[in-house]
Image (spheres, grey):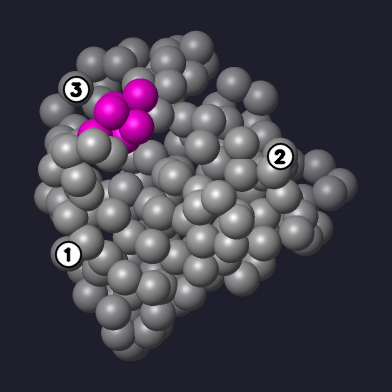
Amino acid sequence: MLTSDVATFLQGGQCIHLGTRSETLEPTGVVVVAVSVDSDRSHLTAFLPKVGSSEVLANLEANGRAALCFARPVDDHACQVKGTYVEARPATKKERAVVEAQWDQSLRQLEHIGMPRQLWSGYAVWPCVAVRVRVTEVFDQTPGPGAGAPLA
């Protein structure tokens, strides 16, 4: 289960990547545009752009393992969440506001470190696939002596 501090961080518009592996152990991944943490903090929903996510979704269906890396570019604070795939479904219209708000926060952070918003202007963030994951492990990935330490 996630701590409340970690849950807040995950939903704060970080730069997020979801990684999986194929049956032949080839890594695949996709940019995640937003995350929502369940109220009991045992599960999260990652919102993946529908365009470009088919290989990752196939791998999740095949092996059920997910690793999500969260990084805040403005100060390098980072963590990794490992979990098991529960389900994928189309994101709802109601969820679109959350997706767009978190994506905007991510872009603002990238702008702060010198990456213009225009670099991402062609990236399709909607429609999304909502991927539910049961959290099994959480690790600090912030550079420094604590990197790799469990957080929950």
Q: CA distance from mark 3 to mark 2?
A: 31 Å
Q: Is residue 98 magenta?
A: yes
Dot placed on the residue nearer the N-terminal end, 3 or 2: 2
Q: Amino acid at mark 1?
A: Ser
Q: Amino acid at mark 2?
A: Asp
Say whether marks 3 and 1 touch (CB < 8 Å).
no
The residue under the point 51% across, 61% down is: 43
Q: Tell me the residue that label 1 is attached to.
A: 54
Q: Is residue 9 left or right of residue 106?
A: right
Mark on residue 37? none
- Magenta-colored span: 96-101
In this rendering, the answer to whether 49 lies above or below 121 is below
Count neighbours of disc 3 (C-alpha within 10 A) and say few if under 14, some if 14 to 19, many if 20 or more: few
Furthest-right residue in view? Answer: 145
Q: Quadrant of residue 72?
A: top right
Magenta: main secondary structure: helix
Q: Is residue 145 left or right of residue 112?
A: right
Say whether marks 2 and 1 touch (CB < 8 Å).
no
Q: Tell me the residue that label 3 is attached to.
A: 121
Q: CA distance from mark 3 to mark 1?
A: 21 Å
x and y percentages locating residue 31 in the rendered image: 34, 46
Count neighbours of disc 1 (C-alpha within 10 A) and say few if under 14, some if 14 to 19, many if 20 or more: some
Dot placed on the residue nearer the N-terminal end, 2 or 1: 2
Q: Is residue 65 magenta?
A: no
Q: Tell me the residue that label 2 is attached to.
A: 5
